[in-house]
Amino acid sequence: MRDIISKEIIEEKTGGIITCEVYDELDSTNNRMKEYIYSGKRDVGLIVADSQTMGRGRMGRSFDSPSGHGIYMSLLIRPDMQGEHALLITSAAAVAVVRAVRKLTGLGAVIKWVNDIYIGERKVCGILAEAVSIGAQEMDVVLGIGINVTSSNDMFSESVRDIAGSLYGLSEYDGNRVSRNEIIAEVVNEFHGIFRNIEKREFMEDYRKYSMVIGKEVRFFKDNVRVSGKAVDIDDNGGLLVDTHEGRILLNTGEVSLRLK
Ligand code: BTN
């Protein structure tokens, strides 16, 4: 049976907390949400596409978005908080995805700082949060989430083929297959549950619990210099603490690499 994404099912499963638009194809769900914000349209809280022609990732990368095989969604968030806490939104989204995937599929999803979701050695989900200023004081955040659900290895661009994977594309997966609608709704519900009290940072306990980085040797660039060290903790703002031979460093943004094999 084809797994068709449905506005009605998503809205029903999220108990009416969100108005949703579903498209067969968009260039990018984040782009569409940003267009809505710039034009003053703020009544759509969730945009989902079955495929994207220009799916975007962090650091200018693209995000492969084949039709029928993934979830490409953008949430409109109005954070009632200062910019320095924006990292919390992506951390909250990572916890929401991990909880949803674990609950619905039983797969052992984990978080690679800052906000990639892995199963085993494969990245199955990426998160791209983009701030949009509206006026001098206010800002919205477009929270884009891409989850590979049934994509096979040949559907990924060569540059990511060694790391990308999908929920049900794992050879060892023989669990329950749930629809994309169910996953989307569960991610939205989990995220909203966290977001209501985001400033309390209670979800950071799960962020640390599901971190695949804490306790591992990591490498990263600082001022264009390659540094390595041991990731020891993640603070309540989502920052990664790394012990290097020059002392403890707090990373607030960027990317770390770790040896997986
Ligand atoms: C990353 O892995 O670097 C982040 C990937 C984010 C992809 C999602 S898919 C929905 C939304 N629209 C986009 O163009 N990007 C995000």
Image (tube, rainbow, N blue to C red):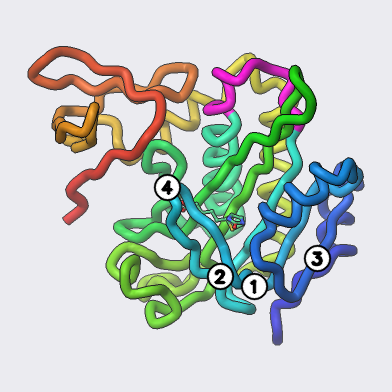
Q: Specify the segment rendered in magenta.
A: 78-88
> Most extreme residue toward the left, as rendered?
245
Crowd class of label 3 (few under 14; some 14 to 19; many from 20; radius 10 Å): some
Q: Nearer the viewer, mark 3 or mark 4?
A: 4
Q: Does ligand 1 reach within 8 Å of label 4's beta carbon? A: yes
Q: Which of the numbered marks, if any, corresponds to residue 249?
A: none
- Pointer 3: what residue? 22
Look at the numbered discs 3 and 2 and tell me whether their residues touch, using CB distance below 8 Å.
no
Real-space Cα distance between discs 3 and 2?
A: 15 Å
Q: Secondary structure at mark 4?
A: helix
Look at the numbered discs 2 and 4 and tell me whether their residues touch, using CB distance below 8 Å.
no
- Pointer 2: what residue? 65
Q: Secondary structure at mark 2?
A: loop
Percent x, y of residue 248: 21, 14
Look at the numbered discs 3 and 1 and tell me whether their residues touch, using CB distance below 8 Å.
no
Q: Which of the numbered marks, if any, corresponds to residue 59?
A: 4
Q: Does ligand 1 reach within 8 Å of label 2's beta carbon? A: yes
85 in magenta: yes
101 in magenta: no
Look at the numbered discs 1 and 2 and tell me whether their residues touch, using CB distance below 8 Å.
yes
Crowd class of label 2 (few under 14; some 14 to 19; many from 20; radius 10 Å): many
Q: Amino acid at mark 3?
A: Val
Q: Residue at x 77, y 51 (%)?
A: 35
Q: Amino acid at mark 1?
A: Ser
In what quadrant does ligand 1 lie? bottom right
Q: Nearer the viewer, mark 2 or mark 4?
A: 4
Real-space Cα distance between discs 3 and 4?
A: 26 Å
